[in-house]
Image (cartoon, grey):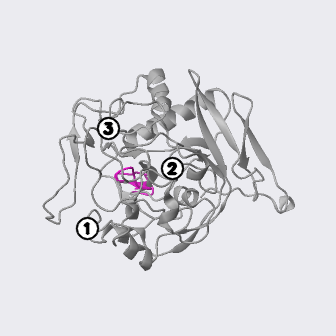
Amino acid sequence: MINSRFAPMLQGMTFILIVIFADGNSVPGKLLAADESAPNESKKIDLGGEVTLEVVHIPPGEFIMGSTAEEKEWAVGQDGGAAFSSGGGVREGYEGAPRSMQVKDPFWIGRTEVTVGQFRRFVEETGYLTDAERPGGTTMCFDHDWAPNMTHSGQPPHPWVSMTDKSWRDPNHGVPPREDFPVVCVSYNDMTAFCAWLTEREKKKGTLPEEWVYRLPTEAEWAYACRGGRTDSSYFWWGSNLEDAKGRLNISGIDFLPEKDYVWPGAKLPWSDGFAMVSPVDHYGDRGRNGFGLADMCGGVWELVLDHFDPSGGHEEVYYEDQEGQTVSRPVCRGGNYYDVPGNARCAVRLGIHSVSYSDSRDGFRICLGLSR
């Protein structure tokens, strides 16, 4: 973490750095110990073309990283249903035991995942081609010829195949496209390119100080933001009661797949969440927002973060494969997705992505505005 140092004569005083957006709004940044911005304060960033992106202020604080043995057992049990997809509990071990962590600096994070419409503005302005769109590029998408495994062979259902003709423009969901869907089929490379574009765009306007950038959140920032201010080790941001999930998130439920007469297999919510595939961002309104006012932190789409994947668990400080070179070859993703069973859409769930160029129709991201990491 980057910490400011000040002379003893300044101790006890609070300074606020004001960053002015193009619309006249401001972003407070911490210069000394306390940031007095109101929690849940939000600002809209003008992306041009009448497209905006909303970020929410997150104050410093403490949270619990990891999950208890009881939570891991629930995740792979009958209600959680993660046993097949997690190899009988192997990937739950990636979460580590509960441990207290601290986010020392304030930051701003997207109210929602970046949408198709917001990503389109980036592409329109830059001509950017995603990894999936480049020669030889592929992305993982839903196979509409797939049917549930009815043989009870014990093998996990896997309706995802690599495709060469799909991308964020058409992720093969099999439903009419919407600009307010979270953008998917974008890689870690593509996500960091979006953040670099936004940083450069805002710096040209003079709206950001030198040390502030748009980037992916660190894993600690994401995990802290996901819990919405809770300091316990609950399964979800609202608590550990799955029955209270109704109307809060988009995961496997009682929804027929596009043009099919069956639903996702395995453990599922015993009600419809309104979408067999992905839902529009912030579709569930206030009930779908956590204590920080962030939408879709569990379910929806996996969200990639800045860190390199450490299978032993997440870190308080940003974790790189090569700390000196700040390199990442296997990014971390968090939060679960629309296809997932409840046990795979908890606050503590974390996986490692194949590579920085890999993309998938279940993977997206949300931006962070904070100190450069």
Separation (CA) of disc 1 from disc 2: 26 Å
Which residue lies under the disc numbered 2?
Answer: 296
- Classify residue 128 by image quadrant: top left
Give the magenta-colored segment's residue range. Answer: 322-339
Helix, strand or loop for disc 3: loop
Density class for disc 3 (Cα within 10 Å; few <14, some 14-19, many ≥20) is: some
Determine whether, in the image, residue 288 is placed left or right of residue 167.
Answer: right
Question: Disc 2 marks which amino acid?
Answer: Asp
Q: Position of residue 265 (x, y in %)?
A: 27, 56
Q: Position of residue 298 (x, y in %)?
A: 48, 55
Determine whether, in the image, residue 138 is placed left or right of residue 273.
Answer: left
Density class for disc 1 (Cα within 10 Å; few <14, some 14-19, many ≥20) is: few
Chief secondary structure of the magenta span?
loop
Question: Disc 3 marks which amino acid?
Answer: His
Cβ–Cβ under 8 Å for marks 1 and 2: no
Question: Disc 1 marks which amino acid?
Answer: Gly
Residue 58 drawn above or below residue 317: above
Of the two numbered discs 1 and 2 on the same chain, state the one appearing first in sequence. 1
Of the two numbered discs 3 and 2 on the same chain, state the one appearing first in sequence. 3
- Classify residue 76 by image quadrant: bottom left
Separation (CA) of disc 3 from disc 1: 26 Å
Which of labels 3 and 1 is toward the front? 3
Residue 217 drawn above or below residue 61: above
Q: Along the line of sight, which residue is nearer the eye, 204 or 283? A: 283
Which residue lies under the disc numbered 1?
Answer: 87
Density class for disc 2 (Cα within 10 Å; few <14, some 14-19, many ≥20) is: many
State the residue at coordinates (54%, 46%).
284
Which residue lies under the disc numbered 3?
Answer: 173
